[in-house]
Amino acid sequence: MDAELKSLEGKINQFVALCQRLRSDNHQLRQQLAAAQSENKQLLEKVADAKTRLETLLNQIPEEEA
């Protein structure tokens, strides 16, 4: 009976350690996701700004008369 309890205790300790590791991994992944989303937002803003500047430049080019 004592051996069974020790075995169960060991399995519970392994389970607790696994849960802690998964929580830590999940936290890190959430931080990475937030950083990637922030970077994506910044890049989309840069693309929108570049598009606006390009459209402005294109509108300044005089059209050829045929």
Image (tube, rainbow, N blue to C red):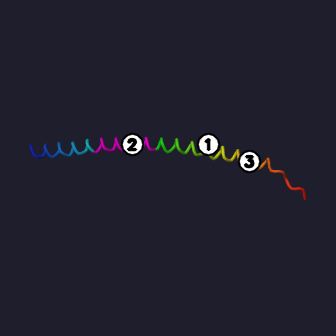
Label 1 crowding class (10 Å Cα cut-off): few <14, some 14-19, many 20+?
Answer: few
Q: Which residue in the structure is indicated by mark 2? A: 28
Element on which disc 1 rests: helix
Q: Which badge, 3 or 2, is on the more N-terminal residue?
A: 2
Residue 37 visible? The answer is yes
Image depth: mark 3 or mark 2 in front: 3
Q: In this rendering, would 66 be left or right of 43? A: right
Q: Which residue appears at 90% of the width and 56% of the height?
A: 65
Q: Work out how far the residue at label 3 is from the one at label 2, CA to CA, in angstroms.
A: 41 Å
Quarter of the figure with the C terminus: bottom right
Label 2 crowding class (10 Å Cα cut-off): few <14, some 14-19, many 20+?
Answer: few
Q: Which badge, 1 or 3, is on the more N-terminal residue?
A: 1
Q: Which residues are drawn in magenta?
A: 18-32
* The image quarter in which residue 44 lies: top right
Q: In this rendering, would 66 be left or right of 25? A: right
Residue furthest to the bottom = 66
Q: Work out how far the residue at label 2 is from the one at label 1, CA to CA, in angstroms.
A: 26 Å
Q: In this rendering, would 29 be left or right of 10? A: right
